[in-house]
Image (spheres, coloured by chain):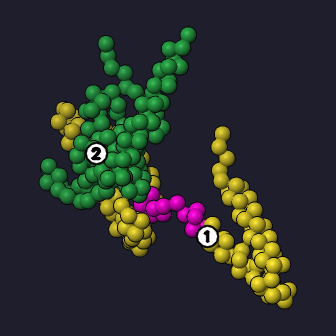
Chain colours: A green, B yellow
Amino acid sequence: MGKSKAGLLQGTLDMLILKALSLGALHGYGIGQRIAQISDDALKIEEGSLYPGLYRLESRGWIESEWDVSDNNQRAKFYKLTRAGRKQLILEEQNWERLAGATMKALRAS
Amino acid sequence: MSRIKATLRFLHAWRHPDEIARQVDAELRFHVEMRTVANIEDGMKPDEAQLAALQSFGDFDRIKGTCCEIRRSLPFDFTPLKIGLHIAVATLAGAAALWVANLPHKSPISVLWQLLFIAVLTCLFLVARRNKRPHRQ
């Protein structure tokens, strides 16, 4: 059975970025790749839309960035999760589980 | 990130908009280059690979503009500061009105007048905010 590409619900992009960064510091391109990897290629983020999301999360203090050298010896901006970001990720996961549970319950209702 | 650090970042972004634009540009170009390399590794010709990378990225200039705008936006909710400023203005307006009416500032009537001024200006502030807020469908 082929995999269907799921569209992202509004608000889930932030959670996915935080989740990707909880596994280690990454540059923007790497974050997109990691999200695709951990979702087994089911979730593909629109590449450009990732960056406004990153800047918003940084302005909220959930992630922070610094310039460093990437694997291919180019300067790249690397993002990492802050302590506040880690707490936010836990909150977002709890909210998501609650929402998913409630939706499943509604769908199974006869 | 502490509020002080966030405020310093915000001020830096306002003082050096060109530097911020350059950094955003470099970051986005790095992404496009990485995608181009990946496309070439997947078997595309360099020209095709770069074109495909730009297409999959989206509207480069719009995204760059949005990022710069976010970087220059206030790092925290400005509302409490606005409310504080409004109360200060209302108190000053009340005191000025009492001075014009030649009423003593510390009499019970003057306090009531000041409270009335603050209440009226608060209502005006709330009405202005409600009208300014975009309507949601």
Residue of label 2: A21
| Residue B136's disc number | none
* Residue type, numbered disc 1: Gly
Bounds of the magenta span? Answer: B70-82
Residue wearing tag 1: B84
Give coordinates of residue B47: x percent, y percent. 25, 42
Give the label, 2 or 1, closer to the camera: 1
Instruction: Establish whether labels 2 and 1 are both on one chain.
Output: no
SS at badge 1: helix
Residue at mark 2: chain? A
Residue at 81%, 75% in the rendered image: B113
Q: Place residue A39 in its image quadrant.
A: top left
**Residue at x 46%, y 34% (from the top left corner):** A9
In this rendering, the answer to whether B8 lies above or below A22 is below
Left or right side of B117 for A101: left
Residue type at the position of mark 2? Leu
